[in-house]
Image (cartoon, grey):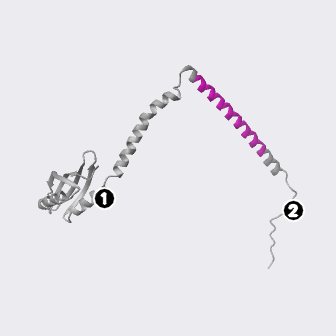
């Protein structure tokens, strides 16, 4: 068997083309950066001149005038933030515990829609029959969180179980 020698480094003279090209590229980069900085200063000067001209000719409102418009937007944001805080501070846990404790296996809740402004809670669900629904309403009224509970609508389903789909409206006493 013949021994194979692989020589990946050949003895060549040093090529000056690579370092010269690198030096030229660095010089071009330095000139480009200097030109960019000069153009940036010119643009800033032109913008300052334009702003002074607009203020002189009354084309742009001054800082005092724009401050009068900001409080309206700020008041709107503060109002929204207060609404979020009010929703977060409501006694949600009491509401959910009251609804759960009043329920039974024969009542399935489909939706719970609180209306904080009117202090009402709309409860949509399905009961096994009308007697179970009426017992559920009585059980809700016994909860401290709720005041009177009204049956808004009901519909007897025409399926084999003859379940009752309902919508209740309850006064929510837990709202501030």
Which residue is denoted by mark 2 in the rendering? 11
Q: Dot 2 lies on which element?
A: loop
Would you say residue 33 sits in the magenta stretch?
yes
Which residue does the numbered mark 1 point to in the structure image?
Answer: 93
Q: How many marks?
A: 2
In terms of sequence position, does the residue under pointer 2 or pointer 1 come before the other?
A: 2
* Residue at 24%, 60% in the rendered image: 98
The spot of residue 147 in percent (x, y) is 19, 53
Q: Is residue 126 visible?
A: yes
Q: Nearer the viewer, mark 2 or mark 1?
A: 1
Q: Residues within 10 Å of mark 1 (few under 14, many from 20)?
A: few
Q: From the image, give the main secondary structure of the stretch colored magenta.
A: helix
Res. 167 visible in picture? no
Judge left or right: residue 25 versus residue 102. Answer: right
Estimate the x, y position of residue 50 in percent, counting from the top left.
60, 25
Given residues 102 and 123, the one toward you in this image is 102
Which residue extends farthest right?
13
Quadrant of the snapshot with the N terminus: bottom right
* 17 with respect to 64 (left or right): right
Q: Nearer the viewer, residue 100 or 158?
A: 100
* Residue 81 on the magenta span: no
| Span highlighted in magenta in the image | 26-54
As drawn, the label of residue 59 is: none
Q: Residues within 10 Å of mark 2 (few under 14, many from 20)?
A: few
Q: Would residue 10 be found to the left or right of residue 122 on screen? A: right
* Residue at 17%, 52% in the rendered image: 148
Height in image: 30 above or below 128? above
């Amino acid at each position: 068997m013949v021994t194979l020698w692989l020589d990946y480094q050949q003895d060549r003279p040093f090529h000056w083309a690579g370092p010269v090209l690198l030096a030229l590229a660095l010089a071009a980069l330095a000139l480009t950066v200097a030109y960019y900085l000069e153009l940036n200063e010119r643009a800033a000067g032109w913008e300052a001149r334009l702003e002074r001209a607009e203020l002189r000719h009354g084309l742009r409102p001054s800082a005092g005038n724009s401050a009068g418009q900001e409080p309206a937007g700020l008041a709107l944001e503060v109002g929204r933030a207060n609404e979020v805080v009010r929703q977060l501070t409501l006694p949600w846990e009491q509401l959910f515990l009251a609804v759960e404790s009043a329920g039974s296996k024969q009542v399935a809740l489909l939706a719970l829609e609180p209306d904080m402004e009117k202090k009402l809670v709309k409860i949509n669900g399905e009961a096994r029959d009308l007697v179970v629904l009426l017992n559920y309403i009585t059980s809700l009224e016994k909860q401290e969180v709720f005041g009177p509970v009204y049956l808004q609508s009901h519909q007897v389903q025409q399926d084999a179980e003859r379940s009752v789909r309902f919508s209740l409206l309850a006064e929510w006493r837990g709202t501030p």
